[in-house]
Amino acid sequence: MLRRTVKSALSTEGFLELDGVFQCYTLEPTYREKPGIPVSVWKIMGKTAIPVGSYPVEVTFFSQAKYYSPILSDVPGFTGIRIHIGNFPNDTDGCILVGTKLGVDKVVNSKIAFDALMQEFDGARQNNEGVQITVMDDWGAVPNLTAAAPRQAVAAAAAKSKTPGLPT
């Protein structure tokens, strides 16, 4: 579940939970959604967060960045929406960036958060589990970090990994 918590003129901040447990922080482009109005009316190409909803996710090769990353399917009005490494609003044209820390209009330690998230996706794939992400507006919500300790251990292990071709 991706919970959007803060919107600004430059970005949309939030956090990602897996099975109800905090995984990482998220950064998307500016929130512009107008419920009940077609996406084509409110979307600004490359500068708009995707609409709320639930979307199937699979991991494929991200040729632009030269590594594997999750891609969301069936997003109304959008194509090529990925979860990937990046820190600032200019690093995304609609995709979801992840990080271990959140700043104003930025996420930090993106590669560490991404590597930990990819371990979770690998586990789901090995168990033949389908993956879906639900994006919701939850303005002002805060993550429950007390349950996040096991996930942070995974993140620490991922930080030690040396994945060639991945930026930091």
Image: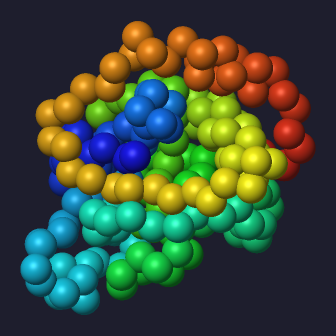
For image coordinates 12% across by 72% down, the residue present is: 34
Q: Quadrant of the C terminus?
A: top right
Residue 92 on image: x %, y %: 48, 60
Question: Left or right: where does residue 55 sit relative to residue 29?
Answer: right
Question: Left or right: where does residue 43 sit relative to residue 18?
Answer: left
For image coordinates 61% across by 47% down, the residue present is: 85
Q: Using the image as rendered, state which of residue 160 and residue 54 is in the foreground.
A: 54
Q: Is residue 45 in sight in this rendering?
A: yes
Residue 6 on image: x %, y %: 21, 41
Q: Is residue 10 in sight in this rendering?
A: no
For image coordinates 45% across by 15% down, the residue present is: 147
Question: Left or right: where does residue 160 sit relative to residue 47?
Answer: right
In the image, is residue 51 above or below residue 10? below
Total number of numbered discs in the rendering: 0
Q: Using the image as rendered, state which of residue 149 and residue 47 is in the foreground.
A: 149
For image coordinates 38% across by 56% down, the residue present is: 134
Question: Left or right: where does residue 31 sit relative to residue 91?
Answer: left
Question: Picture quarter containing residue 3?
Answer: top left
Q: Using the image as rendered, state which of residue 67 and residue 88 is in the foreground.
A: 67
Q: How is the image coloured?
A: rainbow
In the image, is residue 54 above or below residue 118? below
In the image, is residue 43 above or below residue 68? below
Residue 16 on image: x %, y %: 43, 39
Residue 126 on image: x %, y %: 80, 48
